[in-house]
Image: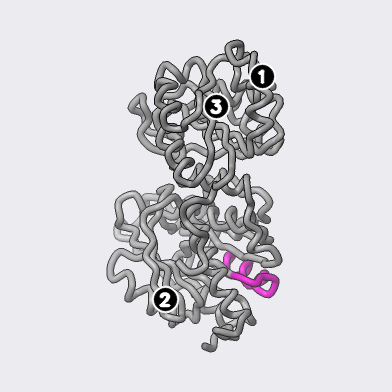
Amino acid sequence: MEGSEPIGQTLIGKRIVLGVTGSIAAYKAVILLRALLREGASVHVVMTESAVKFVTPLTFEVLSGHPVSTDLFAAHQEMKHLSLPEQADAILIAPATANCLAKSALGLGDDLLSTLLLTAQCPLIMAPAMDGGMWTHPTVRDHVETLRARGALVVDPSEGPLASGQIGQGRLADEAVILEALQTALAPRQDWRGHRVLVSAGPTQEPIDPVRFLSNRSSGKMGYAIAEAAQARGAQVILVTGPTALPSPRGVEIVSISTAEDMTKALSMRLAWSTVLIMAAAVADFRPRHPVSHKITKQGPSDRTLDLERTTDILSLLSAQRTTQLMVGFAAETTDLIAHAKDKLTAKGLDLIVANDVTIVGAGFGSDQNAATLIDRQGSTIELPLMPKRALADAILSHAQALLRSRNSGLISPIIAGGS
């Protein structure tokens, strides 16, 4: 993909300490190790006593080509708790159990892995994995916030089936997400420095009465991922968001709204500030024409009619107001994906549109993954496979960055005031 980061061999010359703790997800660390090696890293594995009950050290030793360290006292003669972190470019703990998070946050050192963390000066990336409601337990959340406040990069676990049979958030994050976090910690990209990115996310809620509203299934995850990725790559970011249950991305200014009218006003007020607009929100197309001020009761006619009117077409409005902003839209479709997306790209005067089929298994509303096709106004069409939404966010930003570079070099001209 034009403008994207190269794939493969991104960690050449990097020395990584891979910490493995006692989680059922320890077997996934083997897959992660192979990925690190494929990217060119030299990997030294440190396992806790509990981890060796799930995967043998020999597995990691054969694959990494280095002895695996498991015992603080056996390794004491070589001072591994000092030499490993001194020589490491980064320490990656995957999976990290709740116990590992607690010891790291409290500064306890009762084994080799926890002790070497007390001497480490390099970046620390932790990818938790745990079962049940442990990830959302207040104590675990406190430990995670403590670690993040100290500069550790904690990769949130994903949602899905857990080892216990429950469904919840606790699965080890996808290999691509962990690798991206590691790459960000080692060499943070700043290719969006100097840009001001205005992002919309989430659904809108159009009131019927004080307790009911019209809305949609949008979780806001895609827009939040874009805001987080743009901020991590150096941009100033304002996120205008409808109601969601998501934590606010760090370093991002949040503007909370409820209705399509609220979002229209919030984005219009900030458009002139921005250099790039990314419209990832799922705005309601219709709203009740006459919302009532009191709760509608069951009494009265049983065949009530809800009179609807169209909401403002925000993208068209902003496109007409633009000066030199790069504008990116989304097309969530269930049929004729590419045709509908191209029509929207042209009708709304966009530079780039992200088309996604919400009927694809694992890529619908609320999912942590998405698949998309990027279509720009130069006619380029790029299909992206199912991937974590944060990875897709970076792919979108990279393609938008390529469009910005082409514009700055004079290869393409900006659309001004809705013209082409």
Depth check: 397 or 185 in front? 185
- Residue type pointed to by label 1: Met
* Residue 403 included in the magenta stretch of the image: no
Numbered range of the magenta stretch: 262-276
| Residue in the image at 45% along x and 71% along y | 353
| Residue in the image at 58% along x and 45% along y | 13
Residue 88 image position (x, y, % from top left) = 63, 35
Q: Which residue is mark 2?
A: 380
| Residue in the image at 41% along x and 50% along y | 369
- Secondary structure beneath disc 3? loop
Q: Which residue is mark 1?
A: 79
Looking at the image, which residue sits at the far bottom? 419
Residue 247 image position (x, y, % from top left) = 58, 45
Q: Main secondary structure of the magenta part?
A: helix
Q: Which residue is mark 3?
A: 137
Instruction: Say which of marks 3 and 1 sits in front.
Output: 1
Q: Is residue 326 above or below residue 252?
A: below
Assess whether mark 1 and mark 2 are in contact (beta carbons under 8 angstroms): no
Gap in angstroms between the C-alphas marked 3 and 1: 36 Å
Residue 109 image position (x, y, % from top left) = 66, 17
Depth check: 210 or 285 in front? 285
- Residue type pointed to by label 3: His
Quarter residue 402 falls in: bottom right
Q: Is residue 407 above or below residue 153?
A: below
Assess whether mark 1 and mark 3 are in contact (beta carbons under 8 angstroms): no
Assess whether mark 3 and mark 2 are in contact (beta carbons under 8 angstroms): no
Instruction: Say which of marks 2 and 1 sits in front.
Output: 1
- Residue type pointed to by label 2: Ser
- Secondary structure beneath disc 1? loop
Name which of mark 3 and mark 1 comes first in the sequence. Answer: 1
- Residue 133 visible to an observer of this rendering: yes
